[in-house]
Image: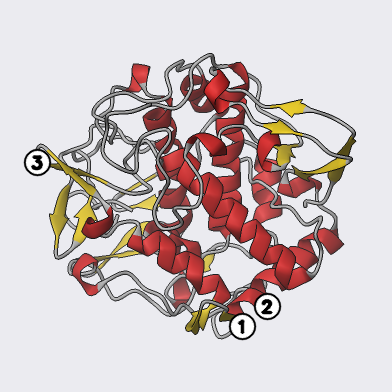
């Protein structure tokens, strides 16, 4: 994720709408972003709030995740199908997949304009995998609305993601389906990013709200409204330093008072000025994982690492980020920036690492991509 001040380098819901005999136009600010669907029927899955899932729907998602963890990746059996997603997320921070610009670095999926479309495709592929594992073509990812205590309680319930870590057991998660001894972390952050940390564990860890010598809370509805009020998608220099009043992407990603990112032993390092705030997307990662002192070193929970998808709650957090993106798309007259002229892989008609299968523009609009959210936040 990001460097801890002065220390670490790391910082469906079931429901389907069938639209028959239609022509659907999904346009975001420009005819270039329109896509037309024709045919007898189009299946639109509905992503719901976790708190609105039934017990059987929760169980189906959990079972699919566990099966994916136990199933070899069809493309590379040296790791599991689930761990394919952890590897993709880790390697998005590799310098070879990032861009060097005037002494600063910006990544393939973070700290860059591709943050939102990249994670939208990432979620789509994860959702597809869960459907394969469950055999249920109607399964859809739910979202965790972290501004709603009821949604938070549902996410961390014993029948879904399990709760906080136990300090008596090195903050291991000890309830729910992903407990120590059952859920094993195989893909870890590179050693170069753990120089100032206690070693990353092979079990899921959480230390809610702890951040070094202070505490943090989950984002508020007011903070969400503030980000959604930004009219422009992004702005030069298209990284963590993009001006917040002109960059919805950066406002939502959560960078504040960013320093110049740099490359260290082949990995991009992002950090902020000491004691700067952590907001929205970044804040949730910090809140769930936690960062705490152990002697003269720091430890951090699973969600604080670049390999944060090792904690399955990652996907429900990012479904909410995508939901906020969908809310912004619905009301904004702006569209993706940069349109052209930027680094290869950032422009609207470029494809994204590591898939290179579709243009960035094609990921704008949820209906055109086969899903919608059961509810969107109020502006």
Q: Is residue 108 visible?
A: yes
Q: Which residue is mark 1?
A: 70
The image shows residue 305 at horizontal and vertical percentages of 36, 61
Quadrant containing the C terminus is top right
Q: Earlier in the sequence, mark 3 or mark 1?
A: 1
Q: Which residue is mark 3?
A: 103
Q: Earlier in the sequence, mark 3 or mark 2?
A: 2
What residue lies at 55% left-to-right and 26% top-to-bottom?
Answer: 33
Decide which of 207, 185 is in the foreground and name it: 185
Decide which of 75, 308 is in the foreground and name it: 75
Decide which of 195, 269 is in the foreground and name it: 269
The image shows residue 248 at horizontal and vertical percentages of 43, 25
- Above or below residue 54? Residue 115 is above
Query: What is the distance, in whole Å, between disc 3 and disc 2 at their CAs?
Result: 44 Å
The image shows residue 9 at horizontal and vertical percentages of 22, 58
Left/right of residue 127 with respect to residue 321 in the rendered view = right
Q: Are marks 2 and 1 in contact (CB under 8 Å)?
A: yes
The image shows residue 211 at horizontal and vertical percentages of 34, 51
Look at the numbered disc 3 and give the secondary structure of its residue: loop
Query: What is the distance, in whole Å, between disc 3 and disc 1 at their CAs?
Result: 42 Å
Query: What is the distance, in whole Å, between disc 2 and disc 1 at their CAs?
Result: 5 Å
Look at the numbered disc 2 and give the secondary structure of its residue: helix
Left/right of residue 378 with respect to residue 216 in the rendered view = right
What residue lies at 46% left-to-right and 70% top-to-bottom?
Answer: 171
Q: Residues within 10 Å of mark 1 (few under 14, many from 20)?
A: some
Decide which of 21, 364 is in the foreground and name it: 21
Q: Farthest residue to the front: give it.
A: 39
Say which quarter of the image contains residue 113.
top left
- Above or below residue 37? Residue 131 is below
Q: Which residue is mark 2?
A: 67
């Amino acid at each position: 994720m990001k460097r801890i001040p002065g220390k670490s380098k790391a910082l469906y819901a079931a429901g389907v709408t069938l639209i028959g005999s239609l022509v659907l136009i999904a346009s975001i600010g420009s005819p270039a972003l329109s896509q037309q669907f024709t045919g007898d029927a189009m299946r639109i899955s509905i992503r719901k709030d976790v708190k609105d899932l039934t017990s059987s729907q929760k169980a189906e998602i959990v079972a699919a995740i566990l099966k994916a963890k136990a199933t070899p990746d069809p493309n590379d059996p040296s790791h599991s199908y689930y761990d394919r997603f952890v590897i993709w997320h880790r390697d998005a921070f590799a310098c070879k997949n990032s861009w060097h610009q005037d002494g600063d670095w910006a990544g393939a999926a973070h700290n860059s304009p591709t943050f939102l479309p990249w994670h939208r495709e990432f979620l789509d592929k994860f959702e597809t995998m869960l459907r394969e594992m469950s055999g249920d073509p109607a399964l859809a990812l739910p979202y965790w609305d972290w501004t709603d205590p009821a949604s938070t309680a549902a996410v961390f319930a014993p029948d879904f993601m399990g709760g906080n870590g136990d300090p008596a057991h090195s903050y291991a998660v000890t309830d729910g389906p992903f407990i120590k001894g059952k859920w094993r972390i195989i893909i870890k952050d590179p050693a170069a990013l753990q120089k100032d940390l206690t070693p990353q564990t092979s079990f899921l860890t959480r230390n809610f709200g702890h951040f070094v010598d202070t505490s943090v809370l989950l984002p508020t509805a007011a903070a969400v409204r503030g980000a959604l009020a930004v009219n422009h998608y992004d702005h030069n220099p298209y990284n963590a330093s993009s001006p917040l009043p002109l960059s919805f992407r950066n406002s939502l990603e959560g960078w504040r008072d960013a320093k110049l990112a740099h490359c260290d032993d082949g990995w991009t390092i992002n950090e902020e000025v000491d004691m700067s705030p952590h907001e929205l997307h970044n804040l949730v990662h910090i809140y769930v994982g936690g960062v705490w002192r152990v002697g003269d070193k720091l430890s951090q929970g699973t969600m604080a690492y670049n390999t944060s998808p090792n904690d399955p709650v990652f996907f429900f957090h990012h479904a909410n980020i995508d939901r906020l993106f969908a809310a912004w798309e619905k009301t904004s007259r702006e569209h993706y920036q940069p349109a052209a002229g930027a680094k290869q892989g950032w422009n609207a008609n470029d494809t994204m690492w590591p898939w290179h299968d579709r243009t960035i523009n094609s990921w704008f609009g949820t209906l055109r991509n086969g899903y919608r959210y059961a509810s969107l936040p109020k502006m």
